[in-house]
Image: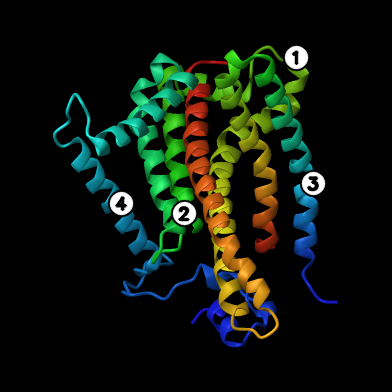
Amino acid sequence: MTGSLNVIGYGLATLGPAIGLGMLIGKALESMARQPEAAGMVRTTMFIGIAVVEALALLGFVLAFAL
Amino acid sequence: MTHVLAAAEWGGEFDGVLDDINALFDFPKFIDLGVWFGQDIGINRTIIIAWLMTALVGVLFVIAFRKPKIVPGKLQAALEMVIDFNRQIALDIIGPKGLKFVPMLTTFFVAIFALNIAKITPIFMLPPTGRMAWPLMFAVIAWLIYVGVGIQNQGLGGYFAGIAFPPGVPKALYIILTPIEIVSSLILRPFTLAIRLFANMAAGHILVVITLVTPWIFLSSARGWPIGVFGVLLGPLVFAFELFIIALQAYIFTMLTAVYIDSSMEAH
């Protein structure tokens, strides 16, 4: 069997952000459904949160190639 | 001849396609300008695409706003929507004081969007933002602006003291908090801005290349042609997804710049 360990490393690196994104977007949807009038504010904050959480997964992606 | 093209000639040895991932981002120089300060500054495909997209955006904006009308035409209405979108970002995140940053935010948004869209533009098919230099320069400019705004609004000492020693924290915690805050505010912020844009564009470029190479390799193969048909059907979906990613990344970069400016507007 041949291959690169980096791919497995990247797979592991996606787990945390995946859980984080799921919780984040789920909660954001929940609050948008409860208070549709606050949807705009929730969406903006959600995107900021997504950007921060996603950075971890992207670091994993870049480092899989870099290292 | 890149490795991708070579893989196609081998006749469906799919292992070979991504043997050297750098081949997707490496292009021969058209014009050799020599090596300056240790950097090869030859003119290659990336920089030509960037020039063309810049010229395109410039021409579009000049045509749209050369003779602005009260009842806008189609092009003017479309570009006014772009500017209004950025104005809304500034108002939502920074507040009324953010209006003076609207030109800067619009420049970021339009520049990043234009450079990203080269990824799915026929003939170009390469995002200049998929090379680290472009996102890094954008991030450095954003860093200079939000640090500059912080120094302007809070004074040199006030801004850096505000970063290093956030108020309302027990004194003992500063041992842990100060290094974290300094690293996260001054180093990690521009770094993650650049990495986010770069990684999304690089990954997207690889995805597009794989999507386009799959039909090419497999349609001519005797047993593998169903995979080729699948690749053809998948193409439009991948392009639509990439269009979404392109717009989202331009939006996120602009919005995070606004958030960072907001955080340095006043002491927190």
Residue sitting nearer the eye, B104 or B136: B104
Q: Within the image, what quadrant is residue B105 found in?
A: top left
Residue at mark 1 to residue at mark 3: CA–CA distance: 34 Å
| Tag 4 and tag 2 share a subunit | yes
For the N terminus of chain A, give its image quadrant: bottom right
Chain to which the residue tagged by mark 2 belongs = B
Residue B54 is marked as 4
Residue at mark 4 to residue at mark 2: CA–CA distance: 13 Å
Residue sitting nearer the eye, B218 or B162: B218
Residue B265 is marked as none
Q: Which residue is mark 2?
A: B129
- Asked whether, in this view, residue B263 is left or right of residue B225, the answer is left
Picture residue at 57% right of the left edge, 37% below the top:
B189
**In the rendering, at what x and y percent does residue A23 appear?**
76, 32
Residue at mark 4 to residue at mark 1: CA–CA distance: 50 Å
* Label 2: how many Cα within 10 Å (few below 14, some 14–19, many 20+): many
* Label 1: how many Cα within 10 Å (few below 14, some 14–19, many 20+): few
Above or below, comparing residue B125 to residue B92 in the picture? below
Picture residue at 65% right of the left edge, 43% below the top:
A55
Q: Which residue is mark 3?
A: A15
Tell me the element at label 3: helix
Picture residue at 57% right of the left edge, 56% below the top:
B238
Chain to which the residue tagged by mark 4 belongs = B
Q: Amino acid at mark 2?
A: Thr
Tell me the element at label 1: loop
Residue B249 seen in this snapshot:
yes
